[in-house]
Image (cartoon, rainbow, N blue to C red):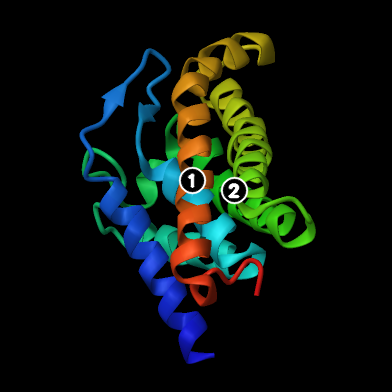
Amino acid sequence: MERSLTHIALFAALIAVLGLVPQITLASGVPITAQSLGIMLCGTVLGARRGALAVLLFLALVVAGLPLLSGGRGGIGVFAGPSVGYLIGLPIAAFVTGWLVERTSLSIGLAASAAAVIGGIGVLYVFGILGLSVMLGKSLPEAAFLGMAYLPGDVLKAALAGMVTQSLARMRPASLLSRG
């Protein structure tokens, strides 16, 4: 139990640290950030339940007003902007990513990369595009077009999540809770 709480807190901190990478905001008003890599790693390393809990802890700190989102954003007001769909989808994306890693027999690097694409990109984009559509008053195809601008970077993050997870599995197999 204590080990799980430590991992959850560490990964919530990892997501926050990844927000320090300078943001680039696109026309949709949603910034490009490294924090989605942290979401993918929560699932691939911690597994479904712990990964989602780490993201929920991070979001609770954001709601409490800590400026942990990229660009120093925080507070409940961030849920009233174009990023709302992505923010709501973060814990679900981490859960799905972890669930897929836990249930596949593929090698850990391949499993982590594939799960990061399906959960960390596919699931997250569903929520993000719906949020963009509602908050910007765009049709779903228009919102999807805006959301696809993030795809090249997210594919790179998914590959990186697979490599990091595979390296952790090799160097410290006990730290990989998604397969333990």
Q: Report the quarter where the C terminus lies.
A: bottom right
Secondary structure beneath label 2? helix
Give SS at disc 1: helix
Q: Please indicate, yes or no, whether residue 68 appears anywhere in the rendered image.
A: no
Query: Residue 125: x, y in percent?
Result: 61, 31
User: Which mark sits nearer the N-terminus, 2 or 1?
Assistant: 2
Q: Give the residue displayed 78% in from the left and 55% down from the top.
A: 104
Where residue 127 sits: x, y (%)? 63, 36
Along the horizontal axis of the image, is 61 left or right of 55?
left
Name the one closer to the observer, 10 or 173: 173
Q: Is residue 82 visible?
A: yes
Residue 127's place in the image compared with 169, above or below, is above
Q: Residue at x 73, y 53 (%)?
A: 100
Residue 86, placed above or below residue 74: above
Q: Which residue is mark 1?
A: 163
- Say which amino acid is labelled 1: Met
Q: Is residue 96 left or right of residue 13?
A: right
Identify whether 129 is placed above or below 19. Answer: above
Q: Position of residue 61 (x, y in %)?
A: 35, 63
Q: Position of residue 169 (x, y in %)?
A: 53, 63
- Residue 36 found in image quarter: top left
Label placed on residue 118: none
Query: How much space separates mark 2 and mark 1, taking CA atoms?
Result: 6 Å
Q: Are marks 2 and 1 in contact (CB under 8 Å)?
A: yes
Count of residue discs: 2
Q: Quadrant of the N terminus?
A: bottom right
- In the image, what residue occupies the spot 59% across and 48% down? 109
Disc 2 marks a residue whose amino acid type is Gly
Q: Residues within 10 Å of mark 2 (few under 14, many from 20)?
A: many
Mark 2 highlights which residue? 109
Seen from this angle, which residue lies furthest front? 170
48 or 108, which lies in front?
108
